[in-house]
Image (tube, grey):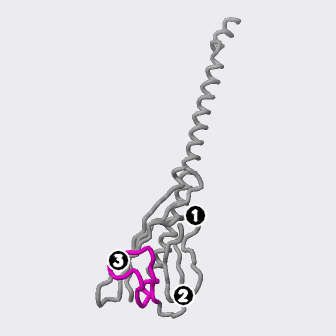
Amino acid sequence: LNSKRTKNRLPQGSALIELMVYISIAVIIFFSISSMISLTAQSRIKKQVTDEVEGQGAATMQLITQTIRNATSINSPTTGSISSTLSLVMPDGGQNPTIFNLSADTLQITQGANLAVNLNNSRVLVSGVSFQNLSRSNTPGTISIQYTLESVGQSSRPESNYVKTFYGSASLR
């Protein structure tokens, strides 16, 4: 009877080995879940930063090109030249001149005697603004536009940094 009981028993120390296997599996699962959560957070931050820059860049380009199309003439830059400031004559005298310019890291529009209005928020920096007058004689006028937007990262993490250069052109109607 005693010999039957000893045959069913596990060797000594096997419970410790089982416990170590269970702990190892739990640690692997924990680190896998932690990695997935971290990657998800990084992706979310990158998407927010990209959407911010892309959205502001597209909205700014839309405003500039629409304003150029509605203008009656170009004050500056002169034909064939490049400038960081664009000055337009508008059909509404109260909007004359309409000026786009870079002030520090902010792109602004000033219409007539009104105060300048920022076209980007504090989460995005603007640089490399250039307006090139591509007009030819006896044409209404064409302006090429270029500017770079950069996210203002709240941390030094790479996913919070994003830079994009926007290009466009528009002709007066």
Q: Secondary structure at mark 1?
A: loop
Disc number lying in front (1 or 2) = 2
Q: Is residue 93 above or below residue 36?
A: below
- For residue 141, what is the image quadrant? bottom left
Residue 142 point in image, percent of width and height: 35, 82
Residue at 51%, 94% in the rendered image: 93
Residue at 67%, 5% in the rendered image: 3
Residue 124 point in image, percent of width and height: 54, 64
Identify the magenta region.
Answer: 66-89
- For residue 73, what is the image quadrant? bottom left
Q: Is residue 103 above or below residue 141?
A: above
- Local crowd size for mark 3, using a 10 Å CA cut-off: few (<14), some (14–19), many (≥20): few
Residue at 54%, 87% in the rendered image: 112
Amino acid identity at mark 2: Gly
- C-alpha span from label 3 to label 2: 23 Å
Viewport quadrant of the C terminus: bottom left
Amino acid identity at mark 1: Arg
Residue carrying label 1: 123
Mark 1 vs 2, N-terminal side: 2
Q: Nearer the viewer, residue 4 or 43?
A: 43
Relative side of 46 to 136, left or right: right
Say which mark, if any, is on residue 110: none
Residue carrying label 3: 81
Mark 1 vs 3, N-terminal side: 3
Q: Secondary structure at mark 3?
A: loop
- C-alpha span from label 1 to label 3: 31 Å
Mark 3 vs 2, N-terminal side: 3
Residue 39 point in image, percent of width and height: 54, 48
Amino acid identity at mark 3: Ser
- Local crowd size for mark 1, using a 10 Å CA cut-off: few (<14), some (14–19), many (≥20): few
- For residue 106, what is the image quadrant? bottom right
Label 1–label 2 contact, CB within 8 A: no
